[in-house]
Image: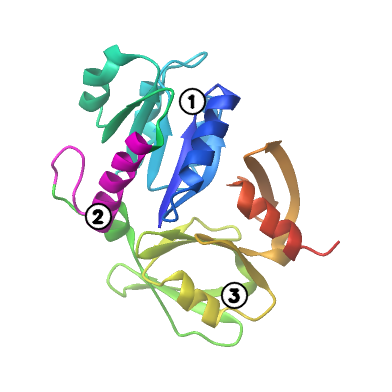
Amino acid sequence: MITALLVDDEPNAIERLAELLESFPGVEVIGTARDVGDAERFLAGRSPDVVFLDINMPGRLGFDLMASVSFGTRVVFVTAHEDRAVDAFRAGAVDYVLKPVDRDRLAITIDRLEALVASPSSQPDGDDGPSVADDEAGDASGDTEDSVTFSADGGKVFEVVPYADIVWIEAVRNYTRVQAVDRRSRIIRRTMAEWEEILPAGSCGRISRSLIVQLAAIRSTQWQSRDQTLVFFRGVVEPLPIGRAATTRLKDLLPT
């Protein structure tokens, strides 16, 4: 599964691209942003596989976002300007797509991304170093009825975390990113399916292919646009941005 963030100041452009991406079963749009600042806030809490990024936006150019893109996240520039391709590839982009976006052309991009995500060690700049997940991944073990033990640094550091303190779990390639109350998020060598088997029944809900949330920990939700909603949790400062399909699923799971 490829998770994607769409960044464009034009609502119609975001909607068009989101609709095209929805036609690819292996792609999930997990958020949208209208400018570089919004995208930076999103990327501070989540790590999509790819950012589809416009270049010319009010205030700051799309190139200004590159410093906030994590090592394992790919960037595809989507723009109406043909003359910035060289700059885009120099900045580390894996593809450069012209507007209006054509589905056949987008399919080439998706094929390229699927190959890159399937081989996470291959980086756009040719560096064969490990991905972010490989660098940061810890382990989960010692599961009980109400807690899990996280270990890091080769098993030298251990932390017992109650299931009730886990507010969301996000798929990151073959790993998961776990956000708990009053703790930094961490990458864990455990799949979404394994988490679903372990978490207490009824306490959490899988609202998309890449996201599980602790329903009881939700404080509020805030609608941002047709394609994005912010979810606020107790004990976590930054909200969680979710896409359109995940918002619909969450509404179904929350009590009325």
Residue located 13% across and 49% down the image: 128
Query: Residue 56: x and y, percent?
Result: 44, 15
Q: Is residue 236 visible?
A: no
Q: Amino acid at mark 2?
A: Pro
Q: Which residue is mark 2?
A: 120
Q: Which residue is mark 1?
A: 36
Side (left or right) of 254 relative to 51: right
Please tell me in which quadrant of the rendered image residue 200 appears: bottom right
- First along the sequence among labels 1 and 2: 1
> What stretch of residues is rendered in magenta?
104-127
Q: Is residue 81 above or below residue 230?
A: above
User: Is disc 3 surrounded by few (<14), some (14 to 19) or many (20+) residues within 10 Å?
Assistant: some
Q: Which residue is mark 3?
A: 162
Assign the C terminus to one quadrant of the image.
Answer: bottom right
Q: Which mark is residue 72?
A: none
Query: Residue 230: x and y, percent?
Result: 66, 44
| Residue 239 included in the magenta stretch of the image | no
Q: Amino acid at mark 3?
A: Pro
Q: Comparing marks 3 and 2, which lies closer to the viewer?
A: 2
